Image (cartoon, grey):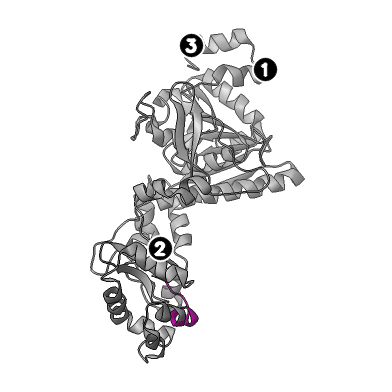
Amino acid sequence: MDGLLNGVRVLDFTDFLAGPYCGMFLADMGAEVIKVENLASKGNFVRGANPKEKKTGRSMYFQNLNRNKKGVALNLKTDEGKELFAELIKSADVLIENMRPGVLAKLGFSYEACKDINPGIIYASISGFGQYGPYSKRPGYDLIAQAMGGSMSVTGWPGMEPTRAGLAVGDMFAGLNSAIGILASLYKKKETGLGNQIDVALVDSIVSAMENKIMQYIYDGKVPEKTGNKYVTSAPYDSFRAKDTHFVIASGTDAHFVTLSAALGMPELAEDHNFHDTPSRNKNAAELKEIIEKWASDKTAMECVEIIDNAGIPAAPIYDAKDVVEDKNISEVREMLVTVPHPEAGDMTVLGNPIKMSSHPCKYEKAAPDLGEDNEAIFTSLGISKEKYEHYKSIGAVN
């Protein structure tokens, strides 16, 4: 695969979402990403997750996050399995792991141990609360991150109970932050030959994404509250009801509002003292919403969007998964739905990479590996003889 990260070998010793998501981005950009699974725990838990590909029963959760990767499986409860893992570490540029802090160290593969094996190893650890601190030993999943990072407190409608985002944003932010740390470390490694230790916490990733919400408390002493779909700094910047369903308008400036008022057939709104500038519109946002929804009440959401969008003001329908898939600009033109070949299932549809590049674009060349699919090819390429490999296989160090 010809990509920007050609020649970079990554060991992806991860499960669930954050770690595999990180490895997926590197694989899509050309790195040789080897999915390492522990036979002692029967491989990745999410190999059994829904939805399933109907012909083969393989998990599309796993397939989507692990396309373009090779796969090995080792029994890390055996000395021989640990020997083979050490050989992989010698050969690698990057190791990504998302076990609870201390677990990999107990197996003999802390950062310090791996650095002794390979001084150039970039060792990226993803966990709920990070590798140090009083919370570090706690288990952490996306829901925990959204709760303690603050995002649930500002998600939902006023008066509602705290609500998590519909997406696993803690996992995905942590995966992306880890990928950024890895790429920066690879850049520096070209100069020094040395690796780096990267520590990314799901909770920290949510706190970082809270951005101005945290600033509001620090500098104004105000604890941000839930505002539904409304922004507190702009109006109209919200969802609105048409005769069939909802749509959104993102009018962010006074100039926007002048244009929007004209598009709605009510240019006088821009001169009204209740709406003539951003502070007044924010103060009277509920009244303004009523006016816009009255205008939209005899129109479909798509008709409203077309009128507003044609005037140059950001507006959009609110899509569900079906709408996203059926919008050809998203799924085909922007290639956010792509296929990878599978020897039994045929072409599998997975999500495309959102990073579009004119040179060395992301490619989708391989379905996710079966458990230990590339064991023999990878370990013999490291200089292990066929006979010795068969011995490792016979004692259960590999499958």
Which label's residue is closer to the chain start, 3 or 1? 1
Label 1 to label 2, Cα distance in Å?
A: 57 Å
Give coordinates of residue 75: x percent, y percent. Answer: 47, 21
Quarter location, residue 214: bottom left
| Three-letter code for the amino acid on which mark 3 is drawn | Ile
Query: Helix or strand or loop: what does disc 2 sit on?
Result: strand
- Within 10 Å of disc 2 (Cα), the crowding (few <14, some 14-19, many 20+) is some
- Within 10 Å of disc 1 (Cα), the crowding (few <14, some 14-19, many 20+) is few
User: Which quadrant holds the N terminus?
Assistant: top right
Q: Which mark is residue 395?
A: 3
Magenta stretch contains residue 256: yes
| Three-letter code for the amino acid on which mark 1 is drawn | Gly
Of residues 243 and 15, which is closer to you in this image? 243
Number of numbered discs present? Answer: 3
The answer to whether 330 is drawn above or below residue 113 in the figure is: below
Q: Badges 3 and 2: C-beta atoms under 8 Å apart?
A: no
What's the residue at 64%, 38% (across, down)? Answer: 121
What's the residue at 37%, 44% (across, down)? Answer: 139
Of residues 307 and 318, which is closer to you in this image? 307
| Three-letter code for the amino acid on which mark 2 is drawn | Ala
Question: Which range of residues does the magenta coloring cover?
Answer: 250-258
Q: Name the residue under label 2.
A: 316
Which label's residue is closer to the chain start, 1 or 2? 2
Give coordinates of residue 235: x percent, y percent. Answer: 39, 77
For residue 201, say whether it is visible: no
In the image: residue 90, left or right of residue 281? right
- Within 10 Å of disc 3 (Cα), the crowding (few <14, some 14-19, many 20+) is few
In the image: residue 196, left or right of residue 350? right
Q: Name the residue under label 1.
A: 383
Query: Helix or strand or loop: what does disc 3 sit on?
Result: loop
